[in-house]
Image: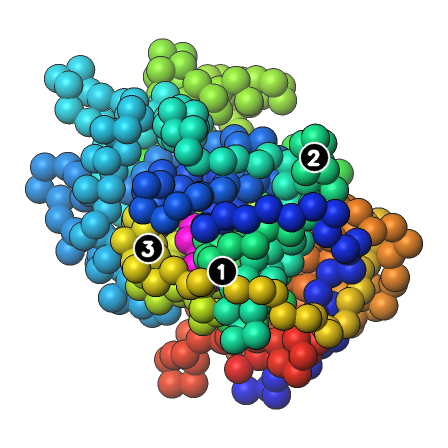
Amino acid sequence: MPTAPVRRVPGRLLAPAPGWTTTADVVVVGSGIAGLTAALRLRGQVGKVLVVTKDVLAAGSTQWAQGGIAAALGPGDTPQEHLDDTLVAGAGACDRAAVEVLVTEGPDAVRELIALGTNFDHDPDGELSLTREGGHHRDRIAHAGGDATGAEIQRALIAAIEQAPEIEVIQHALAVDLLLADDGGIAGLTLHVMGEGQRDGVGAVLCRAVVLASGGLGQVFAQTTNPAVSTGDGMAVALRAGAVLRDLEFVQFHPTVMYLGPDSRGQQPLISEAVRGENAFLVDWDGDRLMQGVHELADLAPRDVVAKAITRRMGESGRPHVWLDARAFGPEKWERRFPTILATCRRHGVDPVTDLIPVAPACHYASGGVRTDLWGRSNVPGLYATGEVACSGVHGANRLASNSLLEGLVFSRRIATVLPGELRPLLPPARDTRTAGLVPSDVRRDLQEAMTGLAGVLRSAEGLADAVGHLDKLAGVAADAVDQESWETTNLLTISLALADAAALREETRGSHWREDFPDRDDTHFSGHIDVVMHDGATAMELA
Ligand code: SIN
């Protein structure tokens, strides 16, 4: 195993002194399924709950989820079978106890979502309609609006929040840094708010606990299914405050993201795995089926297996994508079952009723994040994490399809169970002596290209060393503006360096971490995890 490098990244973001201060008992950062579930469940238990979100309430990744939410809800299905599929997909890196929590509490959590008003799709006989996705041996994915599951869940949660005036919401609020008390635990956080009257600009919220539910890091890469807000802020904020990040190297690339051409950047259209769950299949440029003979589940193999097969075939053929064939659905099924994807494809000039859909893998999901225990607690007293920002241990090296919405739901409920009994007193923030720095927003594109080319779906020691060298150079460029773009870009850089370092340390291929120079899984040397921490006044990073 190579030695753990030390990197210089900001221990705290350069920001103006807070121009306003407020207090809350609990601040929830993020407004997807994880954040809003936590807020709704905490209300009435902890005094004032404040939800802060970087854009509007619906702007995060939940809104974009297509396939659905997995839980053992169908006749004959069991949590044990859901557990087995999750562990296999996770490639030996899941925390079994966390998966047990997920699959046993999952069905009730989904029923609660239904009771809240989420309209899932039903069969003509009135039963919940369940479909299949990669890695599942049963139909266990509940969906809504055909392929608009996340949007429907988000709608129901926002409606519930609007009926809860005791939960305060601040939109357009970026969490800049956590404030720590003398004991190293939470004392509050600094925010940058755009255009909320008296709370405009940088301010401080003094509070007794923070629940991070701020989503993932997809914007680290040049092409991702994640929305623009997914800049890894929560992970970077937590790292700077002393929280441990785990499993950062396990970034999932979704196999079927619509290919829009070589110059397309940022958020790309997802073609849900549920399309393959309904018997669509992948073909190469010769029309040959790609997944037959590669895995017993063929086109429904776990996501990492399919993404690797596509990447290999793209490499062999020299083509930038392969094709997804779902023409057999016909117009009626396309319109009923996948209306969102149908409209998206047509908007981009492809009619999937008659045409093949060009697809290639793109960054989709961070399996790692802020390390938590089974109750969502990080190692920083008063700091909890849930959803994609967290690493609860349920995903291991490769998340099973449609387990992400479920994770946010289940672990937010758990946080709301323990947090009220563990509330800290409101403590004054300690004086902060850490160094500060920012990189300019115009290095973002450069960073994304380096990460995609050198630390993306296929990795090697040489490529990762080049990536880190490049990122280190970018870290030396000083920003001349202190603004949201440079805060986000600095967060992206911090997380990119940690991710690339972790990927270099893991000299094996496992799940979504694919090393061309170490093509095999190595259970003798790499059964553990790679943790990223900051030491020494929070200005250096090393891997442990
Ligand atoms: C999809 O619909 O293919 C994505 C579902 C997921 O990411 O779990």
The residue sitting at 34% across, 63% down in the picture is: 422
Image height check: is 383 above or below 6? above
Q: Are the residues at dot 3 and dot 1 in contact (C-beta closer than 8 Å)? A: no
Please, what secondary structure does the residue beneath circle 1 have? Answer: loop
Name the foreground residue: 316 vs 510: 510
Q: Is residue 202 magenta?
A: no
Residue 199, quarter of picture: top right
**Mark 1 / mark 2, whichever is N-terminal:** 2
Residue 525 seen from this side = yes
Residue 59 seen from this side = no
Identify the residue under disc 1: 426
Q: Which residues are magenta?
A: 383-387
Identify the residue under disc 3: 420
- Please state which amino acid type lies under the numbered disc 2: Gln
The disc at residue 253 is none
Q: Position of residue 125 (x, y in %)?
A: 13, 17
Q: Position of residue 272 (x, y in %)?
A: 43, 35
Give me the C-alpha separation between circle 3 and circle 1.
14 Å
Identify the residue under disc 2: 198
Name the foreground residue: 327 vs 96: 96
Q: Is mark 2 within 8 Å of ligand 1?
A: no
